[in-house]
Image (spheres, rainbow, N blue to C red):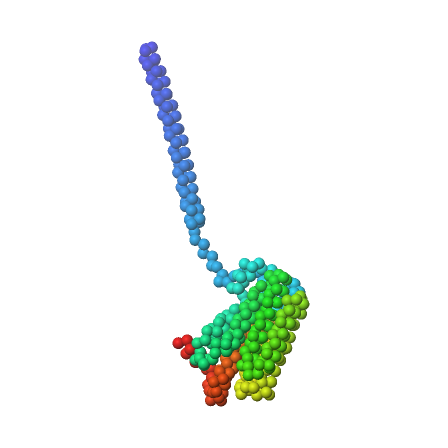
Amino acid sequence: MLDTDLNFSFSKNLYAKEITNILLNSGKVENQLQTSRQESKKQFYLKPQQKSNSKRKTKPNLTIKKPFIDLPLTTYSKLPKWLQFNEHIQSGYRFGYNVKNTFKSLFQYHNETVNIWTHLLGSLIFVFLIFYTFKSEYLKDATFVSKLFVISSPISAIICLLSSTFYHLFEQSSLKFSVGFLKMDLTGILIMITFSTTPMVYFLMAYSNKIYYSYTIVLLSIGIFFIVSIWGGFSFINKMVKLRAFLFVVLSGYCLLLPLHARYLETSSYANYALYRLFLQYGSFGIGLIFYLTKFPECMTKSNKYDIFGSSHQIWHVWIIIASVITYYSMFFLCKCYTNFTNGIPNNADWTQNFFRFQDLINTFN
């Protein structure tokens, strides 16, 4: 009886131990399952985020760049006094750009864009005319010296137009730059007028050395006087701006005197032709000067309609190019008349009516 009780208690204890071991092992397994489930959940939620982050990093930039430079512009009221030339242009001003941004502003819309590009591209026209002078059939009998006098007109026009281009590009940088480049601009105007008139003196007065040298000395003296005045005496921008218009009036009046004198002296039979073309030349300058002085059309409106395009100064620039082309045409024509006169060929109306047609200009380079 005792043995059976002992065996029963032993088996009971053994059975209890096995149950506890099973329970303990099941708890460990359950803990392992829970940890594995948590890790799998973490991996499930973390991996897509990592992928999405990697996609965001490699996502291409779809921003569209603007076609033109976008530098800050200011208004008329915020400009210093030395930049306040036209109160009718109220917006679109550059101010205080460094050299790098100044060159960038070549490709920006502002109120100097047209002023810069009209004269920059206009200078290329006269580069073409220089080559045309030496290839033209009209001047095949002209001497090399005569051709040099003809090309002095487009060369001086290139100097004037490029000086104007740099002035309008850099005038906003600083007062020092504005004064320096304005003096360069005025000097370019003087060079253009002086050396566009010198060929006329040569072609009309070459048969009278005394008159020829007298006109040349006076013309060069006026030019040198104004250059000294610009670089030495004038230091205020407002005075130099007024001087610009005065230069055109004085030198244009002197140039007009030349063919009138030649016609009176009858030193050349083609003085009338020169006088007619001179009226065309200075008539073009005069039309542009009227726009420049009256500030038309922007003075007729209080809106910003002409702030960027169509202002008086831009119209003035276009008329300068037109007048400079007419000047070249006049010198070209006088060179032909001078060559004919030297060779005993009459300068009658038969060939002058068909002279220098546009088609002839194109055919020269074909």
Q: Quadrant of residue 134?
A: bottom left
Determine whether 230 is above or below 46 in the image.
below
- Kindly identify the residue that appears in the image at 43 percent across and 53 percent down: 60
Query: Up-down: is 258 above or below 172?
Result: below
Answer whether residue 97 is visible to the viewer in this image: yes
Taking 57 as reference, is 90 left or right?
right
Q: Residue at x 62, y 77 (%)?
A: 218
Residue 250, by quadrant, is bottom right
Q: Nearer the viewer, residue 292 or 354?
A: 354
- Residue 137 figure quarter: bottom left
* 125 lies left or right of 292: left
Q: Is residue 77 visible?
A: no
Disc tally is 0
Q: Position of residue 82 (x, y in %)?
A: 65, 65
The quadrant of the picture occupied by the C terminus is bottom left
Residue found 34% across the figure and 15% down from its top: 10
Q: Residue at image x 65%, y 69%?
A: 229
Give the image location of residue 63, x and y in percent: 47, 57
Q: Position of residue 193 (x, y in %)?
A: 58, 75
Name the residue furthest top: 2
Q: Nearer the viewer, residue 199 or 85?
A: 199
Quadrant location, the N terminus: top left
Tell me residue 90's x, y (percent). 62, 67
